[in-house]
Amino acid sequence: MVSANQTASVTEFVLLGFSAYPNLEKTFFVLILLMYVAILLGNGVLILVTVSNSHLHTPMYFFLGNLSFLDICYTTSSVPLILDSFLTPRKTICFSACAVQMFLSFAMGATECALLSLMAFDRYVAICNPLRYPVVMSKAAYVPMAAGSWVAGSTASMVQTSLAMRLPFCGDNIINHFTCEILAVLKLACADISVNVISMGVTNVIFLGVPVLFISFSYVFIVAVILRIPSAEGRKKAFSTCSAHLTVVIVFYGTILFMYGKPKSKDPLGEDKEDLADKLISLFYGVVTPMLNPIIYSLRNKDVKAAVRNLVFQKRFAF
């Protein structure tokens, strides 16, 4: 058994990040900083227009506002730490800060999975059962739905973070990642992590597997209904109401599946290249995807584009 003194000896973790590629750090610092500013501005504008424009006070845009706020929270929980690591020679994070960062990133990721499912359900009801839409997606229904997704994501994250932080860390404290990613932290534990692995598996089924199936079946019914619309203009209009959400789902889940589902190289000479590729994919998931969400909804949604134009016009008129 590991003694208490050994367990308490690990008071901080070292984040490797791009330490092995110092020439890339300054370049990525500038790129990620610009992307982070774009995330704050783009998602901030989306939140502003969905709150201020009465025409956007609908379930779909309420969920979109939640998604934008979530993207800001998710990136803010990790990007400042990543930027700091690019400038600091010794890239360390204390045990408690690591736990907080792990909780926030996991909670935001799980909540986003739930929110995307709710948005798919909203599109399903709007297209497949339009007459019942005002009843099914009333304010008394969609507000608790969104709140439930936040509670569920936070609860799952609390469980996983608590299980991870209770493990003894008595040896290596070097995390081969930019942040305290839970799987990277579990690899450092000097105890049996079978409970953590099982718990993570169950959580992944609930927050990844079930939402993917739910969204897939929702769009099967949506596409079936759209194809039965007689006019081409009607089909185009119906599909345009869900194309932005479908694009976001493909980018979000596609990145996750590629990141965790791709086969590992068995060639020792290719491990360094694979490690770099994994980190770049992780950066894409953590920074590029939240930056793309407001762009996708702005470009593919006439209501959002009109609301943004009105907001800009009002600001110019005010000055």
Image (spheres, grey):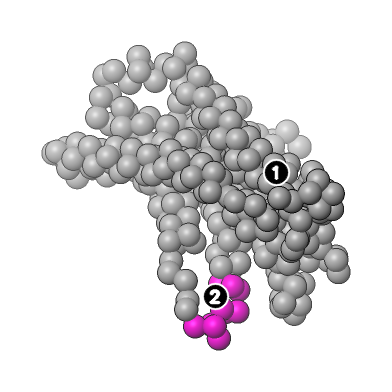
Q: Is residue 65 left or right of residue 58?
A: right
The image quarter containing residue 213 is top left
Q: Could you say which disc has been placed on residue 165 in the image?
A: 1
Q: Which residue corresponds to mark 2? A: 274
Q: Earlier in the sequence, mark 1 or mark 2?
A: 1
Question: In the rendering, at what x and y percent does residue 164 appear?
Answer: 65, 45
Magenta stretch encompasses residue 269: yes
Q: Main secondary structure of the magenta part?
A: helix
Q: Nearer the viewer, residue 185 or 154?
A: 185
Magenta stretch encompasses residue 206: no
* Residue at image coords 82%, 59%: 92
Question: In the rendering, at what x and y percent does residue 179 appear?
Answer: 70, 56
Q: Is residue 182 visible?
A: yes
Q: Nearer the viewer, residue 160 or 279?
A: 160
Q: The residue under label 1 is which amino acid type? A: Met
* Residue at image coords 61%, 27%: 52
Question: In the rendering, at what x and y percent does residue 73 appear?
Answer: 66, 41
The image quarter containing residue 276 is bottom right
Query: Start and end of the magenta stretch?
Result: 267-277
* Residue at image coords 33%, 21%: 133
Q: The residue under label 2 is which amino acid type? A: Glu
Q: Is residue 75 left or right of residue 84?
A: left
Judge depth for marks 1 and 2 and give the one in front.
1
Residue 155 sits above or below residue 189 on the image: above
